[in-house]
């Protein structure tokens, strides 16, 4: 924009023309078309978080092209990529790394992307069935530069398992708590630790669990104040929220 | 029925055979009309539990007449009676006793009704807002002859409160756990005690609590196996279920 | 814990260090990691019921390892295992027994596990479509040591079928009633028998049955007081709840 | 229409003009405006059932005027009129008769309306709380000319009450079954009688009853084929459906 | 029952009295076990309608055996049988006939079953996507002995199609109206014909149609009184309800 | 903005300072605080429609102040104002006009506001209970400058009423169709007229009508393509949508 | 109809017979049976829009026949046809053209169908996952004769992308806005442009998105007045609604 | 606990007795009964946040007593207290301060409570109807020691209002975004600022807004990653979550 304004001062551009350019400019310059989607290289500047590709509704081709374009900034990541699709993406991008449990495909080296420094995050998980979502959260958090502590299978029906790990959890600065079914874990955690807690309901369960809606509702009505919640199975959202907090918490 | 009994007296029918016939036989003759409803004096013989009047949709007149008729068997009880209606019932039945918190009206003396012997029941309650439902359960259980231990305000966000009372709970033979909002208490209890647990979701909460539906769903999806559940705010149902169990558990 | 306290008395441990160890200890000693999941051998001591493996979200490998570890206590069982997955588990654990209707895989001999003595349980089933859930409940109850009576295909639209078996049901001490669609069976049973009734809604039905939600709702609003309910298709939960009751009811 | 066509034959009307008139005519002539609503005196000719005024969203004035206009055909009836509104309507129409339980206001003499002959209808009701809806159905059926048998308080948790009245029900030609909560009555009836059954769910109940939605769902998923259902609390709809059937069943 | 009939032969019991006794009498003796299900040969005597096999949750073996047993009464029918399963049933019962659109399998000759006489039924269908459900209703009605008129593709967005067939519909004694999406057809029909109307919502539609729930709700809230409704896609239920009515309407 | 840019050219403002001002400027200048809300006088310039005050959650004071401020542009209107609140607003703004049926309060003269020219709109209403919503739509449309034709009480169960008015509807350029319960009217209209149709579901109805959700669902699944829908009872939204269309349709 | 009336005038037809013929005639003559469905060649005359075949529930045969019949009017189109089915249709109709992303099959040349003239439509799309629905809307609009501007991937989380294209959107006369997940795009658009906006929610999303129901609800509750909405994923409905408006907006 | 352990070392307590005391002790000592509820003075030590009284289900007496007890730690606060109840509480506690819009009652001086230092929080609010919830969040945050910036009435339908305040929002360290209806504000904010955003859906709206459920769903499905959400109208929960974060962000 400064270039445009300098041109105005220099008389090379009329105020009227400048007004038009200024309205369109800061947005147009970042638009870079890859097939039908628009790559937003400036997103990280604006929001602190690069674009993370949601792979569920995309073809292997679309994923490969988008990762390729985004990885020019250092590294790029796609979620909800099943093993078969990942194999097809790797044919196009041989450098692709794939994490099967978390269904995550990654291109490039996150270290090269030089993220802001970040305090540590604990990813706590109620049951083994919730591990896929927990691992998605942990990998995205690490991709964004956070040190992560994983604490698994500490559901409240076996309270001793949770208490045995409570100090590990307390040492982290932010807690991501992943829980399906009745999702009681974050309520208990909320009474035991004073850290910000981001809760992720999972679609684990059957019958009246209704694909995670009961877990979601239980988390939102938790009697432990200060828990905030993201969408069902949304490990990515929890990781981004936690990293934004952990960056604020970082001390050199 | 008189004919059957006469046949027994005449020696034409063994008492054993007569007992069988009377069990199966005439339903019509026990029907005794009070206004529009039918009083079933034989219900206690068949199911072990006398009729408990659901006062919500009835007028003070209907409640008074029905309690009067049922109390001929010793004692009678009506639930969901608000204070104003209870006052009008007492004008008709001056011997009425009323418990405001539990919204219960009672006529006659349960002791006189000579219930079967019964082991003890713990009524455990997550928050003070759940007390009305818990007290309904406790009073109905006592009306049916059970010794009751009350444990209140032991929600899981303050786990130490619950652990401080856990031995009181373990000493009972059956546990009624009353919880609203995310209803995590019974899941935690289920991992700590080996007694049968009847859980009662309450309509306490707001927003996504949806009048207790989330609490209900959370209880039904609890990761602690062996918890069974009754309708939202249904202290009566929980008490009847618990008493049926506690009678089986009774030892002289 | 006594070892720690003895060390304190002996002066080998400072009170401060002991405080830290006691917080972590009673829980840590029972935790035993198998892959990502934590096997809880002490669960049966605490809750009276051993861990039952929920096979739905697990691989054949995970099921085989977990059953192997748990069967060290005598016997182990996994539910929601389909025939194909069971075949793969059996390749890893040749001693595996598999019940196809109930989708249950079992390792070891429950008798060897020496369960507490237990009174009898009737598993009553409304229609042939509900048989899979009823059989899951029956097998789990037997695994936990209960004698089981099976009564099938006695839905209320053919009341005579139910009445023909009512005496068999009355002889049991606890009743598990399995019903889909409008789930009227437990309401009728509740007026005919005085035993505790655990009702299991099933996902049988179509259209407005909504995968069992209507059956669940109908059971929870039953006009027969004292029925308690578990999650849709949750034969395991009903069996555990019933066994806890039946153990209380047992007389030598 | 014959007038129009005769005019065409007589040459007084061109075919083109007649085509326009015929399109508009058969409908315009029956429209008779009362305030904002249109009275349809021809409805009974077309559908066999006169207009029944739904009083819930109308003022006393609107109800009075509409009943006055409709009663010109012999008699008229309005539903969902509470006692206070009925009193205000009677000030305008002193001949009004009012049934408080059913919340029905009636003007004129149904006998004078000379309905078609009609076989008998049984109105069967599960609990006393369902009586208001049952009585609405019974009164509307009588208003339309049907002989009605009332059978009340025969819920399935006291099966003997129902069996004691089953012959009365079998003697009718059509059955209206009114039931709230889990609404099991019609399923049991469907296995005991061979008459057409119209089921009416009621909003009686609390918690997961959800204002009658569970009762509705239970009726629609009934295992007894041949039961058809109307909206929650819709005594009017059930009565109209039953009368249409009973007229077909009538034998001199 | 043989005793009762012997008493009749001996002249000790009038046939009329015997008929009454047989109707009420023993239920247990009609139970005839086929695999896990109970065949109820007396159902048609009690309810006027033979058992119709719901094929969705059954194996080809179970369907074949049950049809074989039921066809001893003349003819038997199974619904919700897809083409592949029907082929497997036919291997076991070569006389099987199969209707692919309606997914119905039939054994034996309904004419041989000598149903009661029956007035005619119109099966009216809003769109071509609703045809499968409509045909299920039509075939079941014919199986039960009813003459059927089929009227297809007369949705209200093309009102002229419906009006072109209205006289065919009016000539029938009962109307089954099948409609998906917004299900407006029965409301319009209800204002045009004076016959009883049984409406069947279908699961046709997408998005907010929610598998037929909106169609169901629209039918239940229809402004045309006297329409009664069965479960989504429940052609069988509509046919049974309609036949019960049409039998009452039959005139020699 | 031109002023700012001119200042840059004149050297009175540095490019950097101008960049900051331009970001903030076009928005700040229209903000005009009235109590806690921000009056947006430029909204009509941007969107063609002035701000319409939603009165439901506001006090009489807030409504009066906001109307006063907005009426400086000629005229202002508030919806969802009940009679009691309207009376209190009139004490503060004596020139207020109030329409009780539509619950609309108006200040100033819409004619003075000089709206763009507009083609005519038909507001069609299924039942008398829907009149309040229909009138809200009609008054807002008139406030925005549209000529309105009102057609009332033309529900599809009396098809002749609708056909009698169909030419009046066809003469308008846009149709607003207001319907509650099963909301079949717009589907029928969609097959009879070729105009754009905006449908408004209403909360009229009971039981499974669920406060208008079924009407909404029925409208969205209408088999007549080209109907678009607004929120339940949202007469305002329908009027604004219709006026935007009617302005496009206007011919001098 | 004129022929019939002429025959009356000529005396060749009695008025009575003519009345009967006129009732049946205007509808019967357009019915043209193709298999089970009725082709309505007059629909375009009545509603301005030809029949568009909904391919989801139809076989390749049915689609081929129906397209063949409809294409006699110039061109015909079928939606929701997947690639495999399209291949089978093309075997029967080799001239078929197929658009894979939009799942649309087309026969004949829309230009030959001579549609009414039409102003331009902007199809705006929030994310790449919404493209299939947006393209369905765009192709149908073009099929109906509208010039279409496509604006893709302008979700509100990257506001600059939307602002960069806002002038393209403003130049169109009607806007179709396609958005899934939280569907915020139309609310923002509603504050930026003064054109009629038809919003299409999509089923894109997971967890609490509930197959598009949240997007639908968000659109219906939009704070930007004047947005109207069609069913989830209903590109066809949006296109038809938009074209009806754009035709009104057309200026030579 | 150190006292107990010291007693063990001193030999005054056996290890066995100490084990029992340690299990019960740390919890029992903080329990301090006020009427039926348990005051937890140690909660702030454990979780960093003092108990905040939820006033909705409590009497004025209970609120007064609980505030009195809690205020011994410096200050205490109760939410969801309406004006009438607040007046009754003030009779018991004359020092009570009351904020009517936010429905908050406060006793004592938060400054005296010496909270931990805290970075600043922006409370951003979409519409004036959301102000009550926003003010609840702001007041609780201030009570917990946070500096708060309030930004009101910046809904996305008037994007310029939001952009005019964006720098104020960016200067805060954490953002609480309060929005009802379609709740699009946080999605837009998420693309404009890089701070952690806690979103609060409100119950503002009507019809399909369903008491805030759509707003909640829209927030959870937001396309802007990193937004976390609390229960509908839960200003308290958002404030507690934000303060926990802001404390981490604080720099001296």
Image (tube, coloured by chain):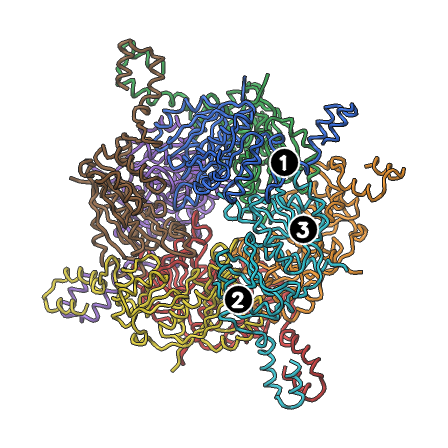
Chain colours: A purple, B blue, C green, D cyan, E orange, F yellow, G red, H brown
In this picture, is B121 found above or below D208? above
According to the picture, the residue beneath numbered tag 2 turns out to be: F185
- Residue B130, image quadrant: top left
Horizontal relation, residue A169 to residue F7: left or right: right
On the image, the x and y values in percent for residue F13 come to 11, 64
Name the element at disc 3: strand
Q: Nearer the viewer, mark 3 or mark 1?
A: 3
Chain to which mark 3 belongs: D
Q: Are marks 3 and 1 on the same chain?
A: no
Q: Is residue B222 visible?
A: yes
Q: CA distance from mark 1 to mark 2?
A: 46 Å
Looking at the picture, tell me which residue is in the foreground, F6 or B28. Answer: B28
Quarter in which the N terminus of chain E is drawn: top right
Q: Which of the numbered marks, if any, corresponds to residue D230?
A: none
On the image, the x and y values in percent for residue D168 come to 71, 47
Q: Residue furthest bottom?
A: D11
Q: Nearer the viewer, mark 3 or mark 2?
A: 3
According to the picture, the residue beneath numbered tag 3 turns out to be: D149
According to the picture, the residue beneath numbered tag 1 turns out to be: C125
Q: Are marks 3 and 2 on the same chain?
A: no
Chain to which mark 2 belongs: F
On the image, the x and y values in percent for residue F245 come to 40, 72
Horizontal relation, residue F232 to residue H41: left or right: right
Looking at the picture, tell me which residue is in the foreground, A32 or F45. Answer: F45
Which class describes the residues within 10 Å of circle 3: few (<14), some (14-19), or many (20+)? some
């Amino acid at each position: 924009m400064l270039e445009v304004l300098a041109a105005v001062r220099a008389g090379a551009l009329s105020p009227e023309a400048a007004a038009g350019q200024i309205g369109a400019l800061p947005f147009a310059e970042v638009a870079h078309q890859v097939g039908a989607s628009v790559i937003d290289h400036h997103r990280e500047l604006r929001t602190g978080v690069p674009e993370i590709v949601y792979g569920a509704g995309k073809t292997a081709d679309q994923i490969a092209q988008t990762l390729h374009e985004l990885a020019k900034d250092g590294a790029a990541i796609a979620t909800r990529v099943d093993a078969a699709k990942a194999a097809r993406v790797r044919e196009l991008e041989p450098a692709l790394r794939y994490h099967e449990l978390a269904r995550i495909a990654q291109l490039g080296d996150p270290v090269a992307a030089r993220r802001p420094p970040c305090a540590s995050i604990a990813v706590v998980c109620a049951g083994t069935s919730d591990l896929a979502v927990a691992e998605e959260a942990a990998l995205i958090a690490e991709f964004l530069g956070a040190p992560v502590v994983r604490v698994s299978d500490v559901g409240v029906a076996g309270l001793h398992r949770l208490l045995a790990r409570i100090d590990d959890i307390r040492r982290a600065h932010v807690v991501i708590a992943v829980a399906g079914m009745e999702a009681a874990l974050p309520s208990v955690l909320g009474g035991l630790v004073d850290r910000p807690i981001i809760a992720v309901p999972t679609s684990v369960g059957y019958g009246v669990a209704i694909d995670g809606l009961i877990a979601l509702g239980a988390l939102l009505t938790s009697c432990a104040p200060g828990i905030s919640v993201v969408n069902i199975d949304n490990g990515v959202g929890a990781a981004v929220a936690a990293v934004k907090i952990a960056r604020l918490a970082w001390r050199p």
